[in-house]
Image (tube, rainbow, N blue to C red):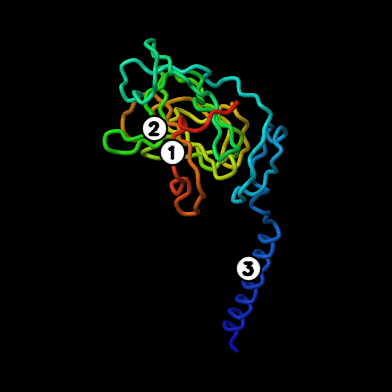
Amino acid sequence: MSDAGKFLFISAIAIFVLGASLTLRARAGMKPAEAALPQTASVMTMTARPDAITATPNVFVAKPAPTGFLKQLSACPGLSTAKAADVDPDLTVRDFKPFVEAAGSVRLATAPVGGGCYSSAFGMRNGRLHKGVDYYSNEAVPVYAAAAGRVRTRAFRGDYGNMIVIEHGNGVYTRYAHLESFAGPDVGDLVNPGDVLGTMGNTAVSTIPRHLHYEVLTGTWQLRLGSFALTPVDVMALPEAE
Ligand SMILES: [Zn+2]
């Protein structure tokens, strides 16, 4: 072998050894994915364990501390889209249920906002299914987690704007759309009922008034479709909870 050939041969071996050692080091430094999940103070009050977010949890149980939810609800004046609600002459929604029970086990707030009026009901609207209920406010009131759970999605979409989806266990999820901004809870974080998720906004690709679009969804989360594999249900039609 010529000198040049020897040099190339030795160089090739050196590069191979260096590469193998770097690969081994990278592997040794890797941690399980769940170790990277952010831990919050709310974890301390939860009885559910912070497992990997792909695991299906039992129903999340948290201390009852919902103080911000609306206890009375009024239909927005002049917005006929809330006409599905049975209202008094002063627009107070009759028989309003502040909390309902989904899947026989998950206690959800029906109006997880710090203020506002009921502007749109669940159901057919302009020939399409409106998959949630809307709460409208001029002010950027807080938006709360409707029940204990874990954040599954927090992202901007053209149609839903700044959107959060929370998993509550037993195949129950809630979606909060068009937020102006996000608060603390991020993907993987556990939340208690009443934790602030962000502020009511008007984010989307198109121009819309400030409101919260709130969905209750049931079913099985799918890898590809995520929350869009779930079935929307009318939160106002669920049985009342204490
Ligand atoms: Zn809506």
- In the picture of the structure, the residue carrying the numbered disc 1 is 156
What residue appears at the point 67 percent right and 32 percent down from the top-left corner?
Answer: 62
| The image quarter in which residue 122 lies | top left
Which residue is more in the foreground, 59 or 105? 105
Whichever of callouts 1 and 2 sits on the residue coming sooner in the sequence is 2
Which residue is more in the foreground, 194 or 239? 239
What residue appears at the point 61 percent right and 38 percent down from the top-left corner?
Answer: 189
* Disc 1 to disc 2, C-alpha distance: 23 Å
Whichever of callouts 3 and 2 sits on the residue coming sooner in the sequence is 3
Whichever of callouts 1 and 3 sits on the residue coming sooner in the sequence is 3
Give residue 19's mark. 3
**Rendered position, 89 above or below 32:** above
Relative image position of residue 89 (x, y in whole percent): 37, 11
| The image quarter in which residue 90 lies | top left
Amino acid type, callout 1: Phe
* Disc 3 to disc 2, C-alpha distance: 58 Å
Relative image position of residue 214 (x, y in whole percent): 45, 32
